[in-house]
Amino acid sequence: MHIAILASILSLTIYWIIRDRYRVRNLNGKHVFITGCDTGLGNSLAKWLDKKGFCVIAACATEKGSQELQSCSSLSLKTVNLNLADSNSIARAVVFVTEQTAGKGLFGLVSNAEGTAPVGPTDWLRIEDFHSVLDVSLLGLIEITLKLLPLLKKAEGRVVNLINAKGLMAFVGSGYSLSKWGMEAFSDTLRIEMQHFGVKVSIVEHGFFKAEEVNSDIIEKYLFKLWNRLTPEIRDSYGEKYLIESQRTSVKRLCDYDISNVIKCMEHALIAKYPRTRYRAGWDAKFFWLFLSYAPSCLSDMLLRITFPAPAESRRPVHGVLINV
């Protein structure tokens, strides 16, 4: 009995490994549209796929980003300016993609965008702080996906949504985690519905990478900005010590230095005959954030409580002990 179970597990494992290695043929000339290509993961993926022979259409938020990307890519790579918070900009980008694909349809859509996210305690925030990230990282990505679905269905293409695994664990106020959870739900719904039309949808959950350290500096600046606009009552309830220790709290020690792990996952989602539903890139995405998201609330709350500082007027009997992770 035990031998039969082990044999079945071994057979399924071998089958999955073989199936996972099948690739789509004749990829040269297929069009892939990537958002967020000024810098970071989107920029690296655009260059990588360009070298692989794809017809890359890279969406950049700035003219400078477009020019720098074109200067180090082949002539087949095209760029388009895109502001995901502006429906008119999205409409212009969709027209550009339609013209570039010339009736062939769109083989791949890679959604990679991070809205500016003021991060801090919820009672430090205003509704516009939530809009600043949700309008880009959730609603903007949903809108451009909806408008490109006809082209994706025509080519029986792929949708790859890049999501930071830190957003899967809501541990600080802002629209950041809201946008990530929203994209997870949207991706799952889209995958189930679009499979009838041959469109495959994958999620790439990545961890913290060295290239993202600049974002940590931006977050610290936003923290100061939020602090400076607080009422005296809220400031007193948290205390300046809370602000100082919040700046020292960091996830930089969890970072992975090899960005190629994410690129390989995105590439597999595009070229595999049977792409996976979810990919996890980076050791912290596979273990730390995944563990926290599935751990009992009492355990995850305790870990977060000892990691982050406590407000000056905290009514808990045990105050947070700062651990710089």
Image (spheres, helix red, strand yellow):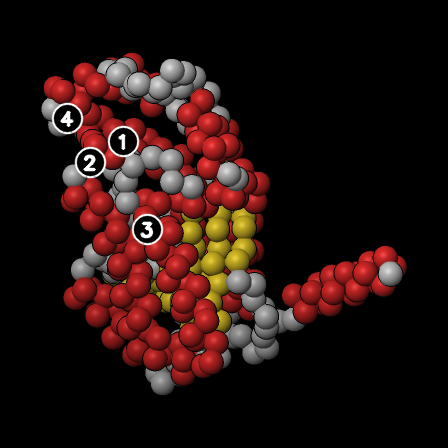
- Disc on the earlier residue, 3 or 1: 1
Q: Dot 3: few (<14), some (14–19), or many (≥20) neighbours within 10 Å? A: many
Identity of the amino acid at label 3? Ser
Q: Residue furthest bottom?
A: 103
Marks 2 and 3, how far apart in space?
16 Å
> Answer yes or no: do the residues labelled 1 and 4 have beta carbons within 8 Å?
no
> Answer yes or no: do the residues labelled 2 and 4 have beta carbons within 8 Å?
no
- Disc on the earlier residue, 4 or 3: 3
- Pick the residue in front: 38 or 225: 225
Disc 4: which residue: 230
Marks 2 and 4, how far apart in space?
9 Å
Disc 3: which residue: 179
Residue 91 at x, y percent in the picture = 21, 70
Eyeballing the image, is 191 above or below 246?
A: below
Marks 4 and 3, how far apart in space?
25 Å
Residue drawn 16% across the image and 66% down it: 88
- Which quadrant does the N terminus fall into? bottom right
Q: Dot 1: few (<14), some (14–19), or many (≥20) neighbours within 10 Å? A: some
- Pick the residue in front: 76 or 272: 272
Q: Dot 2: few (<14), some (14–19), or many (≥20) neighbours within 10 Å? A: some
Residue drawn 45% across the image and 22% down it: 306
Identity of the amino acid at label 1? Pro
Disc 1: which residue: 121
Identity of the amino acid at label 4? Leu
Marks 3 and 1, how far apart in space?
17 Å
Marks 1 and 2, how far apart in space?
7 Å
Eyeballing the image, is 157 above or below 58?
A: below
Identity of the amino acid at label 2? Leu
Occupied quadrant, residue 162:
bottom left
- Under circle 2, the secondary element is loop
